[in-house]
């Protein structure tokens, strides 16, 4: 069974479009994260939710809006996509917020043309 | 601010030991991690160490932590071609964030 799953795996879209990426975890964790990995493999935290509450909100354009309908899901909606948004977006989850191991999804490869 | 640094590349011969080094700045780090990323895949946790430990061994993997120098290393014994990947060092400080290094690309030559 997949622990952390993301859909879609690949996303190719035009500049200016709005798109969503979905994440689900079946580990029973209470904390979920979105990371962005650029072409040089730098991995940066974007958002984190604990029990559906936003606890980390890094300096990210407000075109990015996370939504957590329940503890098992954390979706990422991106408005007015730009070329610089092209990256791999990873979802992760953990139990707790104090340093517990994070489990990563397979990534969503976003290409904005 | 918090920062994690690692060298970007390491090349070893199959059968040799690999040592990947990492330095961090947050003196309040509680957990330090090593993740592995294979091409086209997500990050997979390899091992982690609590900040009150000096060493942790897990089969072919040995993690050494020098808390005074804020230096973490990962040693892979008998490196195989399947170990070729990007290895990320990460630290968890007093806040909620886990800070990742830029990743060390390990190339294993047959």
Image: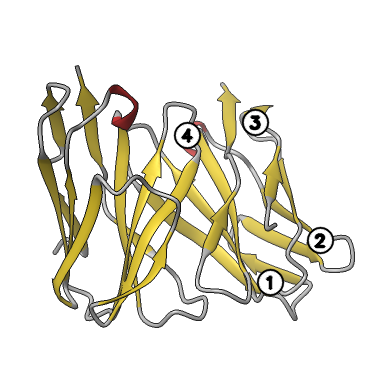
Q: Earlier in the sequence, mark 3 or mark 1?
A: 3
Which chain does the residue under circle 4 lie in? A
Residue A104 lies, in percent from the top left, at 33, 57
Marks 1 & 4, CB-CB < 8 Å contact: no
Q: CA distance from mark 2 to mark 4?
A: 23 Å
Q: Are marks 2 and 1 in contact (CB under 8 Å)?
A: yes
| Label 1 sits on residue | B29
> What residue is shown with label 4?
A41
C-beta proximity under 8 Å, tags 2 and 4:
no
The residue under label 2 is B70
Residue visible at 52% across and 76% down?
A99
Classify mark 4: helix, strand or loop: loop
Residue A98 percent across, percent down from the top left: 51, 81
Tag 1 secondary structure: loop
Q: CA distance from mark 2 to mark 1?
A: 9 Å
The chain identifier of the residue carrying mark 3 reads: B
Viewer-side residue, B100 vs B40 = B100
Q: At 15% from the left edge and 33% from the top edge, which residue is drawn?
A: A10
- Distance in Å between CA atoms under marks 1 and 4: 23 Å
Which of the image's four quarters has the N terminus of chain A?
bottom left
Q: Is residue A25 visible?
A: no
- How far apart marks 4 and 3 lie (CA) works out to 10 Å
Disc 3 target residue: B8
The reply to whether dot 2 and dot 3 touch (C-beta < 8 Å) is no
The numbered dot on residue A107 is none
Secondary element at tag 3: loop
């Amino acid at each position: 069974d997949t622990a952390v799953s993301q859909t879609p795996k690949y996303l190719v879209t035009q500049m200016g479009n709005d798109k969503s990426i979905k994440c689900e975890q079946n580990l029973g964790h209470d904390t979920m994260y979105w990371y962005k990995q650029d072409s040089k493999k730098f991995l940066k935290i974007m958002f984190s939710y604990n029990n559906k509450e936003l606890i980390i909100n890094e300096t990210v354009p407000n075109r990015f809006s996370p939504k957590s309908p329940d503890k098992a899901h954390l979706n990422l909606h991106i408005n007015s996509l730009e070329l610089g948004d092209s990256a791999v977006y990873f979802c992760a989850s953990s139990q707790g917020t104090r340093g517990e191991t994070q489990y990563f999804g397979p990534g969503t490869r976003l290409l904005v043309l | 601010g918090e920062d994690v640094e690692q060298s970007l590349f390491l090349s070893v011969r199959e059968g040799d030991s690999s040592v990947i080094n990492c330095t961090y700045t947050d003196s309040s780090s509680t957990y330090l991690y090593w993740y592995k990323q294979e091409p086209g895949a997500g990050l997979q946790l390899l091992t982690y160490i609590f900040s009150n430990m000096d060493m942790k061994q897990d089969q072919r993997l040995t993690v050494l932590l020098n808390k005074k120098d804020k230096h973490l290393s990962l040693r892979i014994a008998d490196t195989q071609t399947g170990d070729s990947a990007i290895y990320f060092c990460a630290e968890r400080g007093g806040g909620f964030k886990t800070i990742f290094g830029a990743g060390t690309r390990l190339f294993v030559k047959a």
